Amino acid sequence: MKHDIAAQLLEIGAVALRPNDPFTWSSGLQAPIYCDNRLTLAYPDVRRLIADGLADLIRTHFPEADLIAGTATAGIPHAAWVSERLGLPMCYVRSQAKAHGKGKQIEGKAEPGQRVVVIEDLISTGGSSLTAVRALKDAGCEVLGVAAIFTYGLEKAKQAFAEANVPAYTLTDYDTLIETAVRLGAVSEHDLATLRQWRENPEKWGK
């Protein structure tokens, strides 16, 4: 599954690798990779594969879940498809409460005591996932963990989830993706070392 998902993300252009012409992220970080999993919405076969995979992750790791929560906005459609497969209710969580209307941060229904899994499209630093986790806990929910499509595998994210005591599982990851990219001829064996160096020290990479 990990390699299949990685191959699909590369094939549709949801993940782009440029080890010799890096991207600049909104944070200012230079990176040889850019991930836009919103592109998966345009490919029914790919999004079905993702939804099935996320549902299987939840059945395996969080079988007691009784609510699925998507992160706004990219996690929302995947959460909807997963909740449909599992026959569970769904809500979504904004990055912050609305400044108008009822001022909600959680849309839909999340009740105290519900056991929730958060659906995320991408784990970078873990910040957006953990913002959703905190909002759900503040609403009285028990957050079982996070399930996502892809992670960069950054140490900062691993530490953040560990400190929050929140398990996170993904369908595929950075190491699997770059190995798959070499196998598919998207990057060279020489590029592989450069790509691995970035994940080990992203702040100093390329400097």
Image: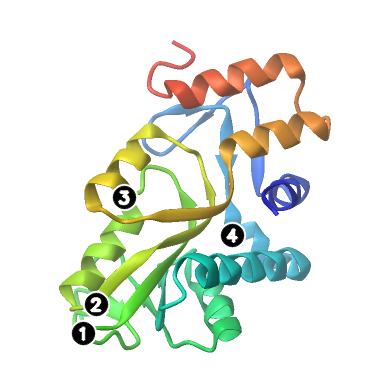
Q: Amino acid at mark 2?
A: Cys
* Horizontal side of residue 58 vs 172, given as left or right: left
> Residue, x 45% and y 36% (percent of image)?
25
Disc marking residue 112 = 1
Q: Is residue 178 above or below residue 127?
A: above
Helix, strand or loop for disc 1:
loop
> Residue, x 66% and y 39% (percent of image)?
177
Sooner in the amino-acid sequence: mark 3 or mark 1 = 1
How many angstroms separate mark 4 from mark 3 (CA)?
18 Å
> Residue, x 48% and y 66% (percent of image)?
75
Q: Amino acid at mark 4?
A: Arg
How many angstroms separate mark 3 from mark 1 (CA)?
23 Å
Helix, strand or loop for disc 3:
helix
> Residue, x 36% and y 41% (percent of image)?
157
* Horizontal side of residue 161 vs 204, given as left or right: left
In the rendered image, which residue does mark 4 sit on? 38
**Marks 2 and 4: in contact by CB < 8 Å?**
no
**Marks 1 and 2: in contact by CB < 8 Å?**
yes
**Marks 3 and 2: in contact by CB < 8 Å?**
no
Sooner in the amino-acid sequence: mark 2 or mark 1 = 1
Quadrant, the N terminus: bottom right
Helix, strand or loop for disc 4:
helix
Q: Is residue 61 above or below residue 92?
A: above
In the rendered image, which residue does mark 3 sit on? 127
Measured from the top left, where is residue 190 in percent x and y? 72, 13
Q: Residues within 10 Å of mark 3 (few under 14, many from 20)?
A: some
Q: Amino acid at mark 3?
A: Gly
> Of discs 4 and 1, which sits in the foreground?
1
How many angstroms separate mark 2 from mark 3 (CA)?
19 Å
How many angstroms separate mark 4 from mark 1 (CA)?
31 Å
